Image: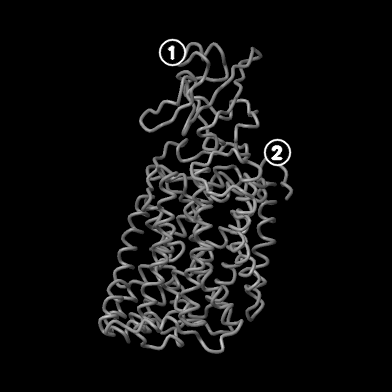
Amino acid sequence: RGGAPKRGRGRQRALLGPRSCGASPASRASAARSRSRAVTPGHRLALAGAPHAVGMNASKTLDNGGADPQPLRVLAFEQQAEFSGCTVSWEQWDRSTTPSAGRSPVSSRSRRSSRSSGRPRTLGPWAVALVVYFNVSGGPWGSEDIVGACGPLPGFVGIFAFMLLWAVPLALITAELATAFPEDGGYNLWVTSAFGEFWGFQESYLSFVSGVVDSAMYPVLAYQTAVRIFGDVWGVPMEAPEDSFVDTGGANAYLCKLVFVCVFTLPNLVSTRAVGLGLGLAFALVSAPFLAFSVMSLLKAGGGTWSNLLQVREGAGWQQLGGLLQTLYWNWNGIDSASTCAGEVRDPSRSFVVGIASAVLLIFASYVVPLSVAVANGRPAWDGWEAGSLSSIADVQVGRWMAAWFVLASFVGSYGQYAAELFEQSAQVAGLADAGMAPAFLGWRLRGCGTPWVAISIQMVLVSLIVGFPFAAILTINNCCSVLATLLELAAFLQLRRAQPDLARPFRVPLRAAWSLALFLLFPFGVGAAVFFSTFSGEGVVAPALSVAAAFIGGPALHWALARLRPGTAPAQA
């Protein structure tokens, strides 16, 4: 009442009562106590819908023991509402709201955000950019097939098309919904708000399975890098035979991978700030050799032959196009990753927009610059490139010292990708527990640093079990679960636009008409469906069978089991 809400030390507060603006703090507190015996100083609980009503007028009613209800006018708030000098609980207020309140129907259970639990938000735009960068890319590792599958021209056109038609739409959607739901949990909260708790749980489950399986790739890559540097120290083969589903490298190889798992996990247990600093250092160490390679390669090639970028592989068919599609998806997947740790991000409306936009540009440059320079150099011929060829390309074009630098950088990149994936998934699991959709102990955090140590430890154990699987199986399960989760997020975006048009969105995708939104999401939906069905087109039946079991059986079964464990609840129906 009386204008815009006041801001005090960066916090927006709720202004309550028709006469609270002009009264003294003592009189306001006295009036508050006389009106409501349910509200006393010091009561604090999670504001389950708080971030979704910022900047809007939401009517609430205080229970004052049968007397005339006192209207509560919420103009804007962040962490807590201040009722005439008293800290009041969102859950103690009557849950009825006006239809125009714009409150998101996320689970009515108590949900503690990082604000309500008193933990500071430590991640800014650069940290958001690094989390997205290492979740999506971490460098051009594995991007050689983009050129080798169908040739430089289709490959670079594919990179640009995926950035424009896949990454940019997902980046805009993530920025809109992450600023509307600035809490740990990210896309779980979006889907829950759009379709209910059952589908929100499936979103978290699919993303978690995909993240854990994907995380297992990076200790294996680090082990293979160590073997390349030190030779066959352990006397074991680099990879499992093609007809073996479980890696047969031996006990020494497995123990070495476990060491990498433990070393990579340690910074995530120390603190959130340590993760951000570690990713910043990893980015510098990964980027440096590729910048040096780009300059040295062009100098040795006399500027290069840039017409090589227009070449196309002769006789390329559907198999090569399918491989190109899988590789492009894998190299651009994960734009939404930073949303799961939104409760750790300060000034979300700015940090997410700037951070995600910066990450997309960095990812695009990390693919295009080294690959285009290597193609322009012309040695070795691009038609022989495959995943893992970058070190040999650097050896031929620049020298052995550059190849060794690439190998060391790949080791650092493996850490960065693992740490970012672990950070994302542990924040998601903790947010799920805070929302009351998983056992509370999964949200336990270390005192002093606030890291979700239980969620991190569980993920570390699961990764330790999966590192024995070969890459083909890991990639199949990862792509199947991740693309289903992404399709759910796209559907949630459309549903929230339709069902909750008044939901507070500090950043909004600048499209409102139904036809423009449909056109905007046409390519992401099409690519997602194609990637999902392509996971069943490869050889073998074990990995596709595990993908089906993990995606369509594991999630509903786990939701039913957890619902049975919660007292006084029954399993929710889809």
Near mark 1 (Cα within 10 A), the count class, few <14, some 14-19 or many ≥20, is: few
Query: What's the amino acid at mark 2?
Result: Gly
Residue on which the image places disc 2:
568
Query: What's the amino acid at mark 1?
Result: Gly
Of residues 125 and 203, the one drawn nearer to the viewer in this rendering? 125
Marks 1 & 2, CB-CB < 8 Å contact:
no
Residue 500 place in picture, x, y as percent: 63, 41
Nearest to the eye among marks 1 and 2: give it.
1
Residue at 62% x, 44% y: name it: 193
Residue 559 appearing in the image: yes
Query: Quick one: SS at disc 1?
Result: loop
Residue at 43% x, 56% y: name it: 357
Query: Quick one: SS at disc 2?
Result: loop
**Left/right of residue 367 with respect to residue 458 in the rendered view:** left
| Residue 197 in the image: above or below residue 403 | above
**Left/right of residue 516 with respect to residue 557 in the rendered view:** left
Near mark 2 (Cα within 10 A), the count class, few <14, some 14-19 or many ≥20, is: few
Coloration mode? one colour
Residue 570 place in picture, x, y as percent: 73, 43
| Displayed quadrant of residue 533 | bottom right
Mark seen at residue 22: 1
Residue 155 place in picture, x, y as percent: 48, 76
Residue 373 place in picture, x, y as percent: 35, 78
